[in-house]
Image (cartoon, coloured by chain):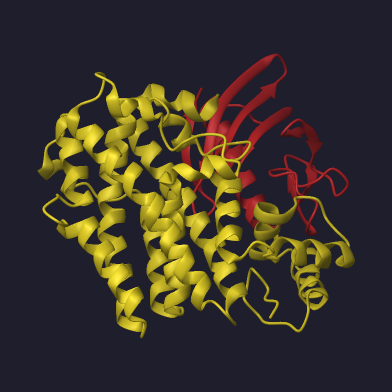
Amino acid sequence: MKIIVNGKEAGSKETGCALCGATWGEYYEEIDGDRLFFCCDFCALEFKNMVNEVKKRTGWSKIDELIINGNYYTGRTCIAKLGEKEYKFYVKFNEEGDVGIFKEV
Amino acid sequence: MPICPSCEIKFNNWYDVAEHIDLMANKRSDKSHVMWLNRNLSIKRLSKEELAKKLEDYFSTPEGLGMWIRKRFIEKFYGENPHPFILAMQKPTRGVLLGYVIEHQHFLKNWVKVLSSIVFKTDKDEVVEYELENIAVEFIGYKGRPSHYELLLRMGESLGMSREKILNTQPLPDTQFAINTWRRIAEEKHWLITMACMHSLELVADRSLRNYGAKLHYFDPQILTSDEYSQAVKDFLREGYEADVSHAGEALHLVEKYAKGIEEEIQINVLKSFDAFSKYLFARLERGIELEPQLMRVITR
């Protein structure tokens, strides 16, 4: 999965956390066959919950590309891509790392 | 004394704090330490030496503690990316204002409870007087004028929502989270920390913030004379607009006066209070979106 966070490629130790772009930490999770880097387990949890929500709503089995803009304070406006298809959404997580607000935009 | 801003352990110097944070964030990926770094210092990993220097600079107070609090508030709420609720308040719709009313009633009720904990704990008469006056202004009414709480409810009624409906609406989770944060501070911390954490929030409506670098006012002051808004809306907004310059400034002065020895504890708890406040302001907007779905454009622009 190609991931862009606030305009920069992310998802590896060199490029930063797949959700927030931070280069602190040392946490990895395998998601859709990719070993992704996260700054902490909480970002990983939020990322997985977000991906699962997108799959549930679109019926897609995977995501090719994910463009994420925003942060913890404002929530995140995102575009998920699969082939030629695009799905735009806004997501904000709750204190447990679950999807708190999710709206198609 | 330098303190870890995440877990509040005390250290002898900033390098020791940096070593501790490096261990917690980089070796253990501890979410609390990583989140603090991401939200306050940098999302880019730093060496221990760089981190120690950044921490020392971040917490230094060359212009005094009050100014440090003021500048951090501006950075978080009025800087390059102003808070979405403040953006929405530049030309508030009915949904924004009703979101404000519904969530803020819970904030105000909690506000006076927390202030009364300061009254209970302090031995400074000037602090007792300041807080009791604030409690009266916010909740009881003062010098023949209605309380902010009453003005808030009247604003809601003028927007077409009954007082009963407003009062019977439970707070959103982010409002409740923020309230719990402030109650925990009030229960566990020194009264001066509580005072700093609460009254620094009044900076939100402080018109003088523009003099220190804020990009916006809390709302466009033309609202106060506009025919587009009811008198009750203008009455509520005017109270905050006129009162909070003196309130926040006076409180920060008192905090600075008595802060010796606990400056760093005040600083890190003020940052926690700002995080809670950000969530709470967002809850006002979230409530507004429930009533007016097109408000989503404020946060997805």
According to the rendering, which colour does chain A have?
red
Residue B155, percent across and down? 20, 37
Q: Is residue B65 left or right of residue B297?
A: right
Q: Quadrant of residue B13?
A: bottom right
Number of on-image labels: 0
What's the residue at 22%, 43% (across, down)?
Answer: B152
Residue A64, percent across and down? 74, 27
What's the residue at 28%, 72% (across, down)?
Answer: B129
Q: Is residue B187 above or below residue B25?
A: below
Residue B201, percent across and down? 44, 55
Which residue occupies the foreground of this view, A54 or B214?
B214
Q: Is residue B296 above or below residue B56?
A: above
Which residue occupies the foreground of this view, B121 or B291?
B121
What's the residue at 25%, 59% (across, down)?
Answer: B109
Q: Quadrant of residue B122?
A: bottom left
According to the rendering, which colour does chain B have?
yellow
Q: Is residue B184 above or below residue B97?
A: below
Q: Is residue B147 visible?
A: yes
Residue B202, percent across and down? 41, 53
Q: Is residue B26 left or right of residue B151?
A: right
Which residue occupies the foreground of this view, B198 or B251?
B251
Instruction: Locate the N terminus of chain A and report the quarter of the image it occupies.
Output: top right
Q: Is residue B159 visible?
A: no
